[in-house]
Image (tube, rainbow, N blue to C red):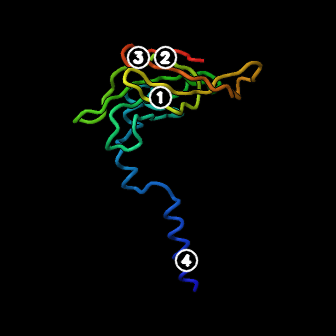
Amino acid sequence: MMRLVASILALTLAVYAGPTTAQQSAWPDLDRLLFSTLTASGTAEASFWLPDQANPATATRALGIVYEYIPGSAGSTSIAVGVYQRTTAGWGFVGSVEGLFGQSPRDAEFGPTHVDLTTIMLGPNEPRCCPTLPVRWRISLASRTAQRLN
């Protein structure tokens, strides 16, 4: 009976544990790609990869976002954003995006000419530590500039 319970528990954990190693390894070394193209130091406090498709085999475009520590500051970071395109040779850097601000980028929606996404920024009377205001952005893929939508 204990063996049956242990087997059920192991199966349950395997189902809820998330992607397998094979699924995770389908993406290239994204931090190396992002850090080499978007940072001066080669490191970042946080990085985000927002592809047009969740499946690495079908994704063809992506936004990469890094937050790099500003030397000499009291924990401040800068934001750097890039557009990436997958070719037969792998993922390549298309160019930097200007004008995007905020933290915790998410909800990327790719259109034929743009990418919309949400970040969190400071709302009225909020302390600098704790932004909560969701801001929607549109990034033009042609000009690689971000425009605030709300």
Element type where label 3 sits in the image: loop
Element type where label 2 sits in the image: strand
In the image: residue 36, left or right of residue 106: left
Q: Is the C-beta separation of discs 3 and 1 under 8 Å?
A: no
Q: Of callouts 3 and 1, which one flags the residue occurring earlier in the amino acid sequence?
A: 1
Name the amino acid type tagged 2: Ala
Q: Residue at x 42, y 21 (%)?
A: 114
Q: Total number of numbered labels?
A: 4
Name the amino acid type tagged 4: Ala
Element type where label 1 sits in the image: strand
Q: Of callouts 4 and 3, which one flags the residue occurring earlier in the amino acid sequence?
A: 4
The CA span between labels 4 and 1 is: 42 Å
The CA span between labels 2 and 1 is: 13 Å
Image x and y of residue 21, in percent:
40, 56
**Label 4, on which residue?**
6
Res 144 label: 3
**Label 2, on which residue?**
146
